[in-house]
Image (cartoon, rainbow, N blue to C red):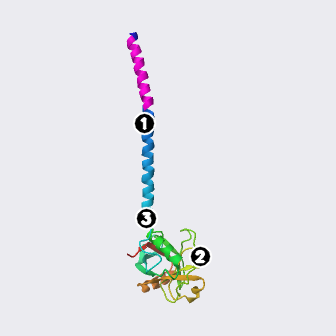
Amino acid sequence: TAPSSTAAMLGRRGLASSTKKAKPEKQKKDGGDFLKALQEEEEHVKSQKRQCMPVQSATEGRPKIYFEIAIFRGAFFGVDHQQTLEFELYPEAAPKAVRRLLEDCAAGRLSDRRFLQITKSTAFLGGGDLGEPEPEVGEGLPHNEPGMLSVSRSADSGGYVLTLAAAPRMDRGHAAFGRLLSGVSFLELIVAARDAECKEVRVVNCGEVL
């Protein structure tokens, strides 16, 4: 009986010893899995950042973006009107604004965003939560027609302004940098929504025109 008991005890010690030796290998394996997962996550983040970068140049040529705009009858009553508006951008007129708008559109940051204020001549698309606005140093285009995209020259106000009519008074404090290519008649519907009850105007989708 004693020998078998001793053997059993040695067996338990041997098993315990074997288990203790295996732990560092398991920890090493777990550590390797963690590093691999971390590297995969970093690659995923880099990939997402690359996907959010604009395809078009923000410094040359005439990059194009689109806003798909919808006019809602309140929060629960559906869409009255919806149309995709395409804009041509002018980097030399306001380089910082063009770069920022291209990045916002490429990342879809302006999708499902409401026009906060609509007057007879302008519609303000909020953007103060999109990052710290930079003062625009470009000369800007004149606000001499409906369908101009514009930004404030100061760093106190983020967001974008869409002109619904000629607004030459904006030339001093704002820099226009984009021009509507087609769909001017839809701007009249935005103006009409201003005077209607329970109307809401939103950019439901945005992106680059490639």
Measure the alpha-carbon separation of dots 1 and 3: 37 Å
When the figure is inspected, residue 157 is found, relative to residue 164, above or below; the finding is above
Residue 148 colored in magenta in the image: no
**Disc 3: CA contacts within 10 A as few (<14), some (14-19) or many (>=20):** few
x, y percent for residue 127: 54, 72
Task: Give the overall secondary structure of the magenta segment.
Answer: helix
x, y percent for residue 20: 45, 29
Q: In terms of depth relative to the viewer, which is nearer, 203 or 190?
A: 203
Residue ID for mark 1: 25
Q: In terms of depth relative to the viewer, which is nearer, 157 or 57?
A: 57
Residue ID for mark 2: 135
Q: Residue at x 61, y 77 (%)?
A: 154
Badge 2 amino acid: Pro
Measure the alpha-carbon separation of dots 2 and 3: 26 Å
User: Tags 1 and 3 in contact by the CB under 8 Å rule?
Assistant: no
Measure the alpha-carbon separation of dots 2 and 1: 57 Å
Q: Which residues are magenta?
A: 3-21
Secondary structure category for the residue under label 3? helix
Mark 1 or 3, nearer chain start: 1
Image depth: mark 2 or mark 1 in front: 1
> The N terminus lies in which quarter of the figure?
top left
